[in-house]
Every structure is written in C-alpha cells, then in structure tokens.
Image (tube, rainbow, N blue to C red):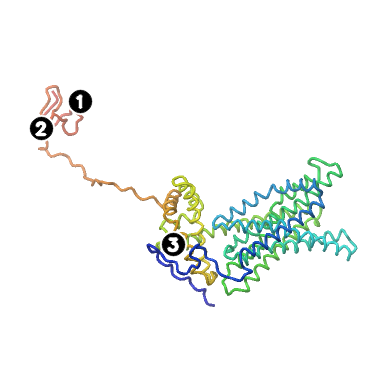
Amino acid sequence: MSSPPSPAPVPPCEQRPLFDAVPERAHWRYRPRGAFWRSRAVRAGAVITLLALSALVILALVREQTGTQGFLVGLGLSVLPVPLLMAAFRWLDRVEPGPWKNLIFAFAWGAFAAALVAIVANSFATRWIATATADPAGADHLGATVVAPVVEESAKAAAVLLVFVFRRRDFTGIVDGVVIAGFTATGFAFTENILYLGNAFGEDVESGSSGLASMTAATFFVRIVMSPFAHPLFTVLTGIGFGVAAMAAQGRRVRRIVFPLLGLGLAMMTHAVWNGSTAFGAYGFYVVYAAFMVPVFGLLTWLAVWTRQGELRTVAGELPAYAAAGWLGAAEPLALSSMRARRVARGMAGRTRGPEAARAVGEYEAFATSLAFLRHRARRGAAGPDFTAREQELLHHLWQRREVAGPALVYAARATGRLPLPAPVMPFPRPHIPYAAPAPHAYPYRQPHPYGHYSHPAGRPAHGQGGHGPHPPDRQYGHRQL
C-alpha cells in the first residue's frame, strides 16, 4: 500500500513575498471556479427560500395542533435549553471556529425543514400502520420505535450532508461533524418540544390540572431538564461518521460512504432504544436513561473533548515548519497550541492597541490554525488539488497581520509559561575573589588612640572596624587597649 504524498516544502518567507498561485488577487480570497449552480448567490437564495417556506408550514401545523395559547407556552419553555446547547457546541469548536452561517443553517434546517419532514412522514406512516393492522395503540408504539428514528435521523442527517458537500473547506474533521450535527439536532428538538409542551398545556387546560402535578410540568421535567441532550446525542453519531469521512484521503471513496452510513445507523439505533424505553415497564425510561443514555453521553463528551485537544496537538505539530521558514516567530506555535495563551494574546493586544488589534490577533490565530489543518490534511493526502493556492492565501493573511499579532503571541507564550522567561543578564559581572587575611605590613601606620581607639592616618577606621568601640588586643604589633 502506497503512503499518501507528502506536502510540498514550506516556501521561505521573503521581505515582500509573492503569491502567484492565488487567483482573484484584488480581494485576496481564493474561490475555486465552478458552474452556475455552484454560485453562492444562487445557493443562498434557494436555501433561504426553502427554509422560509418550511418555517411557515411547520409553525402553522404546530399551532394548529396546540392552539395559540399552547403554542406560546411551548415556545417560551422550549427556548430555555437552546442557548446552553449552542454555547456548549460553540465552545467545542473554538480551536478552528466554523463560520456562523453554517451553524445558523444547520439550526434552521433542524428546526424547520427536518421537523416538517418528520411530522408529515411520521403522521402518514402511523396512520398507514393503524389502517393496515387495525391496532391504533400498536401503530403508535411501532411508529415511535421504528418509523420515527429512521425518518427523523435521516432528515437531520441531510443538513450534515449538505455542509459536507457544499462547505467542504469548513468540514475538516470529527469536531466539525459533531458541531454541525449538534446545532441541527438542537433546532429539531426546539420545534419538537414546542409541540409536546403545547399539547401538554392543552391537556392541563381541559383537565384543570396545574402546578407540579400537571402534564406540562412532567413534560418539561422529562424533555427540558433530564434529556435536553437526547436529540443532539443521536445526531452527533451521524456527525462523527461524516467527520471520519472528511479525514479520509482523496482516493478512499469507500470510507467516505461507509462511515457516514455507519454513523447514521448508530444514530437510528440509539434513537429507537430511547423511544422504546416505555416498553420495558413503568420504570423502563429511568433504566434506559441511567444504564444507556448517560454512559453514551459521557463517552461521546469525552471523545469530543479529546478530539478538540487533538486539534491543538495538530497545531503544535504542523506550525513549527512555518516558523522555521520565517512565516511565524519561534514562540508563536507554542502560543497558538494553547487556548489560554490565545485568549491572553487577544486581551493584551486589546489593552495596548485597541479592539482593532485584538480582532487582528483573533484573525491571525484562525488563519494559522487553518494553515496547520491544511498541511495536516495534505500529509494524509486529503487536501485536494488547490493546496498550493489555499496555502498561499493563508500565508498572505498571516503576513498582513504579523506585526500586530507576533508580539502579542510572544507575550502570551511567556505569560502562560509555555515559553520560559529569559535568564537575567548582569550588566557588569563581578568576578568572585576569595578573601585573604591582610599581610603583617598592610597597615604600618596604625597607632593607638589616646582614648582607647585605633585611628587611621587618613581619618578612616582601620580594617575590620566600624570606627568606634574598643578594639581587641593586636598581638602582632604589641598594642593593647589603654
């Protein structure tokens, strides 16, 4: 088996470097040319139109089922876990932050498009099963454990697939897959919670229940307090599959198909176990929650954090080659491989040179991280034919900001202990001279003072004296205290 080709050597940094491989030099933004349907304006218009129509339809359907009052109550309660989940996934993506437009698209797709597909398909399948089997209760259970996991996870996986295909540069590994999948599932759970909480509130209004014994409180506890991570947990498995596929070399087409399908299958299976927990008795939900969901959640959390640390190790391993070529300072890879040092560098630049400098340092950190990941993908043979142009584009952005970011990163490396402080230098070193007792003839003019003190001819105290007080007998010269 042949090893993947190594990336080209890092070009040395010159006084005024040239970037001949980058097209559209006027804007310094490399974009590979493609067909009309790949135009950003065309794709953005189509996506916005699709999501807007889906939002109108799904919100109208949910309001029809819950009523206006139930819809508003469900909306207010369902929005509570959304900021926490989004902040957690965004924190995971801090090493190489993806663009917000991808995350907003993923959330909107999950909340509107995927939810619309799920509510229509699940309703149709459940009615068909009930008609075919003449068993409505069995149809509901079968629809929840078999149909819903397949439909919902497939609808959410479509968002991950679209980002993987059309935003390939922003989809480089497992962390990107986890974040995109997490935002998609958060949006889906948001709309689904509106439906469940709105229906629960409607039941409470009809029955007159209120307080902790109400159906709304029980639904809120189960879906918002105990399991807000349920849908993100399922879809993250699909994101991991796409992330592994993104790390595969260009010639590994089988891996790019098998791993996403494997992740999607695991997501469906986990979702089915969760939905079918009620079939294990009155306490089946709590048994599945404690014995299955919590361990899987802990394992995936550990995997995501470990992968995030692996990204920092990639930065530390790839950037020294650019430091040796002169593009970066020797201390910059040390600072760029630490999230704390990055934060210190931005803070230092903001305090000393203003918010524009802090923004420039943040951009420098992002471009340097993308450069490290690009070279790492090239080392695995997964960078693509535009490696040289993309590398030169990133180097140009670094070269533009190096005067502002370089000192801040060196300061951060020393402040965080990643770069040892230089040893203090004495301006006038004093050689060590061992002490030697004075010779007998060193002080030939010492005379006793008439009041019992020795005096020096020049008015200074004799050697070893402070200028006052009695002096012990000096047997060398035969002087004694008077």
Camera-near label (3 vs 1) is 3
**Residue 207 drawn at (x, y percent):** 86, 44
Camera-near label (3 vs 2) is 3
Q: Is 481 located above or below residue 279 in the figure?
A: above
Q: Amino acid type of disc 1?
A: Gly
At x 85%, y 62%, the residue is: 127
Q: Earlier in the sequence, mark 3 or mark 1?
A: 3
At x 67%, y 62%, the residue is: 47
Query: What residue sits right under mark 2 in the picture?
Result: 477
Query: What residue sits right under mark 1 in the picture?
Result: 469
Q: Which SS class for mark 2?
A: loop
Camera-near label (1 vs 2) is 1
Q: Amino acid type of disc 3?
A: Pro
Distance CA(mark 1)–CA(mark 2): 19 Å
Query: What residue sits right under mark 3 in the picture?
Result: 320
Q: Earlier in the sequence, mark 1 or mark 2?
A: 1
Residue 332, picture quadrant: bottom left
